[in-house]
Every structure is written in C-alpha cells, then in structure tokens.
Image: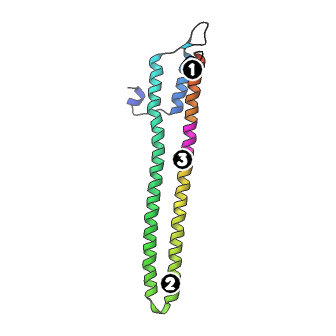
Amino acid sequence: MIASQEAGEIMDIHTLIDKLEDLASQGRSVPLTRNVIVDEDRLLDIIDQMRVSIPDEINRGKQILAQRDRILAQASEEQARTIEIANEKKEQLISASEITIDAKKRADQIVSQAMTEAEMIKREADKYTLEKLRQLEAEMELALNQVRNGIHHIQRDQGGDD
C-alpha cells in the first residue's frame, strides 16, 4: 500500500500528474532513442494513487447531487408545510363572518406567495446544483487533459511506442 494512503491522505490528481511528469523527466535516456527508463515501482505506485484519487473526484460529484436532492426535498417539505399553514389560515379567516371576502383574498395571497417562494427555492437549488456540477465538470476535464498530456509526454519520450 502507498505510504501517503496509509496515513489517510489521498493525493490530488493534479499532484499525481506532476509526479508522473517528474518521473518521466527524471528517467534515464536510452542512447540513440527518445526512450527513457523509469522506475517501474514508482510508475505503478503513481498509477495506483491515480486510481484511488479519480473515484474521489467522482464521489464529490455524487455528493453534490445528493446535496441537491436534500435541498429539493427540504424545499418540497417546506412548501407543503407553508401551503398547509396557509390553507389552515385561509380556513380560519374565511370562517370569520364579518370579513369573509377580505379573508379569502388574503388567504389566497398567502397561498400564492407560499407557492411562489417554494418555486423560487427550487429554482435556486437547481441553479446551485448546476453551478457545482459545472465546476466539477471543469475540474474533471482539466484532470483528464492532464492525464492525457502525461500519457502523451511519456509516449513521446518513448518514441511513440505503446
């Protein structure tokens, strides 16, 4: 097992890509070729660390989606509670004989406002989730590009051999 993982740390994918590039640049050149000799154990160690780190990035995305679901569920519960309270208030106001018409109007306004607020909360939750997912997408694209560049760099240094 990797020493840094034993300590409970999982390295950032960017750090691992930097280590991979360092390993390639520190490798010994094979005379008359573009190939380099690298420490296989170090290379495999870095690859293992990448395998651990990438699922963590994916888990972050799952956490964001779970957070969105919790926010939407909470907003839905709040909406239902607010509508229920508004309807109760509406019934109380309607039952008062001297202000029946005004009470109904006010109750309808409260229900309408509650529904508007609930819709706004849902839109904000969706907006927040979309923003976080776009950020995660950008980070994942950057990480993927760096991995591809690292692979390309090593392949180029090896003369294009796979």
Q: Position of residue 70 (x, y in %)?
A: 44, 55
Label 3: state its secondary structure. Answer: helix
| Cα distance in 3D space between marks 1 and 3 | 31 Å
Give me the disc on residue 133. 3
Magenta stretch secondary structure, dominant: helix
The three-letter amino acid code for the residue at tag 1 is: Ile
Which image quarter holds the N terminus? top left
The three-letter amino acid code for the residue at tag 2 is: Lys
The three-letter amino acid code for the residue at tag 3 is: Leu
Q: Position of residue 19 (x, y in %)?
A: 52, 25
Q: Name the quadrant containing residue 135.
A: top right
Pick whichever of labels 1 and 2 is earlier in the sequence: 2
101 lies above or below 66: below
User: Which residue is painted at 55% across and 27% down in the image?
Assistant: 18
Give me the disc on residue 154. 1
User: Which residue is painted at 56% across and 13% down in the image?
Assistant: 36
Pick whichever of labels 1 and 3 is earlier in the sequence: 3
| Cα distance in 3D space between marks 1 and 2 | 74 Å
Q: What's the magenta region?
A: 135-141
Number of numbered discs on residues? 3
133 lies above or below 39: below
Pick the residue in front: 130 or 41.
130
User: Which residue is painted at 48% across and 93% down in the image?
Assistant: 98
Which image quarter holds the C terminus? top right
Question: Which residue in the structure is indicated by mark 2?
Answer: 104
Neighbour class for label 2 at 10 Å: few (<14), some, many (≥20)? some
Q: Position of residue 80 (x, y in %)?
A: 44, 68
40 lies above or below 3: above
108 lies above or below 161: below
Mark 1 in CB contact with mark 3 (< 8 angstroms)? no
Q: Name the quadrant containing residue 14.
A: top right
